[in-house]
Amino acid sequence: MRSDVIQTLLVANRGEIACRIFRTCRDLGITTVAVYSDADDGALHVREADLAVRLPGAAPADTYLRGDLVVAAALAAGADAVHPGYGFLSENAAFAASVQDAGLVWVGPPVKAIELMASKTRAKELMAGAGVPLLAPVDPATAAEDDLPLLLKAAAGGGGRGMRIVRELGALPGELLAAAAEAASAFGDGEVFAEPYVERGRHVEVQVMADEHDTVWALGTRDCSLQRRHQKVIEEAPAPGLDDALRTRLRDAATAAARAVGYRGAGTVEFLVSADGRPYFLEMNTRLQVEHPVTEAVFGLDLVALQLRVAEGGPLGATPPSPSGHAVEARLYAEDPARDWQPQTGALLALDLPDVPSLRLDTGYTGGDTIGVHYDPMLAKVIAHAPTRAEAVRLLARALERARIHGPVTNRELLVRSLRHPDFAAARLDTGFYDRHLAALTAPAAGRDPARAALAGALAAAVTATSGGPAPTRFGAWRNVPSGPQLKRYRSEPDGAEHEVAYRTPRTGAPEPHDAPGVRVLAVTPDRVTLELDGVARHFTVTADGDRVFVDTDAASYTFTALPRFTDPATHTEPGSLLAPMPGTVVRLAEGLAAGVPVEAGQPLIWLEAMKMEHRILAPASGLLTALHAVPGHQVEVGALLAVVQEDPAAIPVPEETA
């Protein structure tokens, strides 16, 4: 029996998954090696590794996607094995082969299995032969009205790239071109195929683990239906609401899929389950999944440890452990869901979760790190495990609500509200959840009170100033007059609403709010304020960083920027200016777009690629494009002027009462 005892492991990845693999390696006594780009110099995964090798450059194509450099790094560091993590080179058969050709242990499936599953079209043909249920493909050239809606998918894709839903035949040619262009850009392969789009379908998957001794485990089910842009946001195990017959069918199909390709190691077989309970094979991911912790929690397993055991030639047990309880995972992203999921960058000042049993945090960041523009915007995964689904959901929502996350805008509030949504609580799950509910989930929450939070921030700043701490920022010639009420102006993030706070600072005692009925100050320090609000004492934790103020309460968190008393006219831009919402690369322009052409409100004009996603820049109004500065292939900084649209007054609807 083959036995390759791994002593030193290089993880060909970064961020959260590298840190997670290192954690298991420490438990097993394995020396760890990180690789890092220039953009990741000093990143958490580099700090946690025993050894680290630099990959010169910043872009993924120059660093983490360079298999030759990764193999050279492993040899230079004295590693005897390579774990690919997920993403990057994890499902690249040529890379897996090159690792083995270099005499290193590949902690992943056989090269042949990766090759067979690399193309979704070839995988479906193979699964049909294995008796796995499939959706019938549709030839886009002969598609008719009866075939709609269609889902276009990149044959070599993943992570939602190259996917489009087509509901009108007239839109099919354009969407095919767009999907192929995105697939070619993301995967170097522009092949796209079409299949029926299942309305209100659920994304359900089965974790498999196989060894070289003909043992295949099917480790229950996971539901990953809550997705944005075809990328998962909340996952759970086991998938709720499935009857025993369907669970058995999914497990049997996943086992058949693994055996059909001679699988070894950890993999995931993904299915689409229709509203009437029929499963259809989607794809097989020949790697560890982002959502693997929920399966680990329910089965009491370490899947990375099992991957290493199988890679060393060791056997799995005859049967897996019995599952226990329910686990839910939420992906915390640096992004703004209310603004087309725009990724956010900048300094992450704090990332702290409550220390609660049965709560797990997998992250590649700590407070003080910087979120850059080159990689996925996921900050962390938060996982809760409890005896029942309701208890696990409650624990996860409350932990996210109480977390201290200071820095760029995140999807934290969306996650909390999603977990508490009636449809989620009742397990009414499908991939259209955010299509239906996003507007309501990102609308101002009823329980939020930014005005009182801004007051707490102002009172804490006043105490800081009078106690000899850092002086508050002053603007221009305006100053506070002690004899009268003092004023502070704040802009809240990410909605941009402004709040003006008035307070008095007596010669002795704490500062007091001015003209704020129902508010009484109970205690004020530079970092904590307690206010009695309508008879209820509430605590506010205040953290200042320059002009930014972070206020955390028991049930909500707020971010403010201190504003000058008077606005600076120089900050205004020309009306109709389209500014880059994030740093990125201009990937394409609307067909025929040039200065002097007319545009319509809401028309996509410019496509930016940033942090592994494409973002559309839309015309703010109908009118004339008077300037165009965006050039395909050029990188732009946040706030860069891309174009200017001069609004056409004739296109503005006239109110009925004045018509």
Image (cartoon, rainbow, N blue to C red):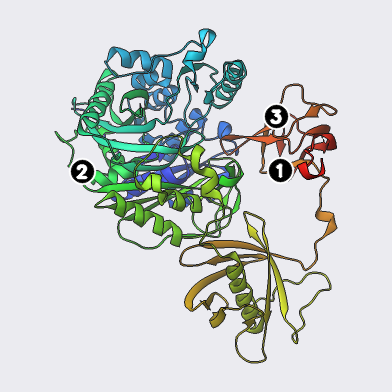
Q: Secondary structure at mark 1?
A: loop
Q: Nearer the viewer, residue 276 or 288?
A: 276
Residue 77 shown left or right of residue 444 in the figure: left
Where residue 251 appears, as percent x and y from the top left, is: 24, 29
Number of the label disc, if any, that sits on residue 633: 3
Where residue 437 appears, as percent x and y from the top left, is: 49, 43
Q: Residues under labels 1 and 3: Cα distance?
A: 13 Å
Where residue 502 appears, as percent x and y from the top left, is: 69, 76
Q: Earlier in the sequence, mark 2 or mark 1?
A: 2
Residue 214 shown left or right of residue 494 in the figure: left
Which kind of residue does numbered mark 2 sit on? Pro
Labels 2 and 3 touching (C-beta < 8 A): no
Name of the residue lying farthest toward the bottom:
508
The residue beneath circle 1 is 637
Q: Is residue 49 at all visible to an observer of this figure?
A: no
Quadrant containing the C terminus in the rendered view = top right
Identify the residue at image location x=54%, y=62%. 448
Q: Nearer the viewer, residue 126 or 22?
A: 126
Which kind of residue does numbered mark 1 sit on? Glu
Q: Residues within 10 Å of mark 1 (few under 14, many from 20)?
A: few
Q: Secondary structure at mark 3?
A: loop
Q: Residues under labels 2 and 3: Cα distance?
A: 50 Å
Which kind of residue does numbered mark 3 sit on? Gly
**125 versus 563 height, above or below:** above
Q: Secondary structure at mark 2?
A: loop
The residue beneath circle 2 is 323
Q: Residues within 10 Å of mark 2 (few under 14, many from 20)?
A: some
Q: Quadrant of residue 12?
A: top left
